[in-house]
């Protein structure tokens, strides 16, 4: 079966991150794969498709980074505040995390699953595909968002 997305639940989580009135700075989207237990065959499970749903959410970026373990793949929508002393701007990033231990089949499904996520997560400054923990560094991501933002008028620090 093809992967589906719970658009209503994912849109609600997406809007929490975008809303300036909440403290939520990130949300993850993950695939759940329901397994149906077959009572007649005690050790057999059946694949019943998969659905993308909102996962965890939080305030602290370090907590988000801890969700990115080597055995998972997930999509993260993250709010960053950039700018200088005179002007702060909110930028959003779509981060696709693919852990080192994720199977080849799951890696291959990432592209089609991301298409579904992008039906909900439509506004972001930059998209990242990351499988190395070093690339999750907050300063690295903020720098990339700054580059994607175009003109930089913060001459005091350059």
Image: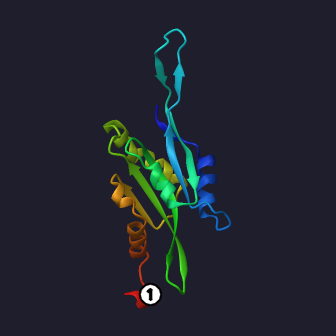
Q: Is residue 110 left or right of residue 7?
A: left
Residue 147, image x, y percentages? 38, 75
Q: Is residue 32 left or right of residue 148?
A: right
Q: Residue at x 62, y 47 (%)?
A: 9
Residue 48, image x, y percentages? 50, 27
Quadrant hosting residue 151: bottom left
Q: Residue at x 50, y 33 (%)?
A: 33
Residue lying at the far right of the rendered structure: 21
Measured along the vertical axis of the image, is residue 45 above or below residue 115? above
Q: For mark 1, what is the residue?
A: 154
Quadrant hosting residue 65: bottom left
Q: How many marks?
A: 1
Measured along the vertical axis of the image, is residue 103 above or below residue 61? above
Q: Is residue 137 left or right of residue 49?
A: left
Q: Nearer the viewer, residue 49 or 35?
A: 35
Measured along the vertical axis of the image, is residue 9 above or below residue 123? above
Q: Residue at x 49, y 55 (%)?
A: 64
Q: Nearer the viewer, residue 119 or 131?
A: 131
């Amino acid at each position: 079966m093809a992967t589906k997305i719970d658009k209503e639940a994912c849109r609600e989580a997406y809007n929490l991150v975008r809303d300036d009135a909440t403290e939520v700075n990130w949300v993850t989207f993950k695939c759940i794969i329901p397994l149906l237990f077959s009572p007649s065959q005690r050790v057999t499970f059946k694949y019943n498709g998969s659905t993308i749903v909102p996962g965890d959410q939080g305030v602290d970026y370090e907590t988000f980074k801890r969700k990115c373990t080597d055995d998972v793949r997930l999509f993260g929508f993250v709010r960053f505040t950039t700018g200088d002393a005179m002007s702060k701007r909110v930028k959003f990033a779509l981060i696709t995390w693919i852990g080192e231990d994720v199977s080849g089949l799951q890696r291959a499904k990432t592209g089609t699953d991301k298409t579904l996520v992008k039906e909900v997560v439509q506004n972001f400054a930059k998209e990242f595909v990351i499988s190395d923990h070093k690339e999750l560094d907050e300063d690295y991501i903020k720098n990339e968002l700054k580059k994607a933002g175009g003109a930089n008028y913060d001459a005091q620090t350059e």
